[in-house]
Amino acid sequence: MPLADNILLYAVIGVALLVAVILAIGIGGFARGGEFNRKHGNQMMRYRLAAQALAVLLIVIFVLVAGRGG
């Protein structure tokens, strides 16, 4: 696997983990309710959506790079 594929693969994994962490924080805040959820609930959703968009973009780039053989 060429270096570019490895870097993209690690980037995809990292961003996917970031999405999972943001999602967990958002769900935890929603479940607990209270001040944190009122202040940061929508903000966490926006962060998650941005991270998911980045993850999808990186996955598409990875597939295109891997599909052309490096």
Image: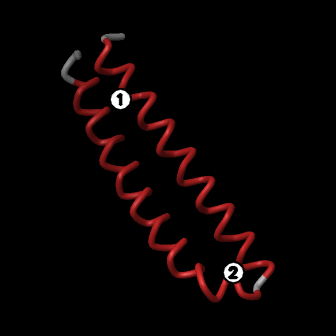
Task: Name the kind of residue labelled 1 in the image.
Answer: Leu
Q: Residue at x 68, y 61 (%)?
A: 24
Q: How many marks?
A: 2
Q: How far apart in space, not on screen, are marks 2 and 1 (Cα)?
A: 34 Å
- Disc 1 designates what residue? 8
Q: Residue at x 63, y 54 (%)?
A: 21
Position of residue 26 relative to residue 57, above or below, is below
Report x, y in % for residue 27.
Answer: 69, 70
Name the one closer to the observer, 34 or 30: 34
Q: Which residue is mark 2?
A: 36
What amino acid is at disc 2? Phe
N-term-proximal mark, 2 vs 1: 1
Residue at 49%, 64% (x, y): give it. Answer: 48
Other residues around mark 1 within 10 Å, as few (<14) / some (14–19) / many (≥20): some
Residue 64 located left or right of residue 26: left
Across and down, in percent, residue 55 comes to 40, 48
Left or right: 33, with 59 as reference point: right
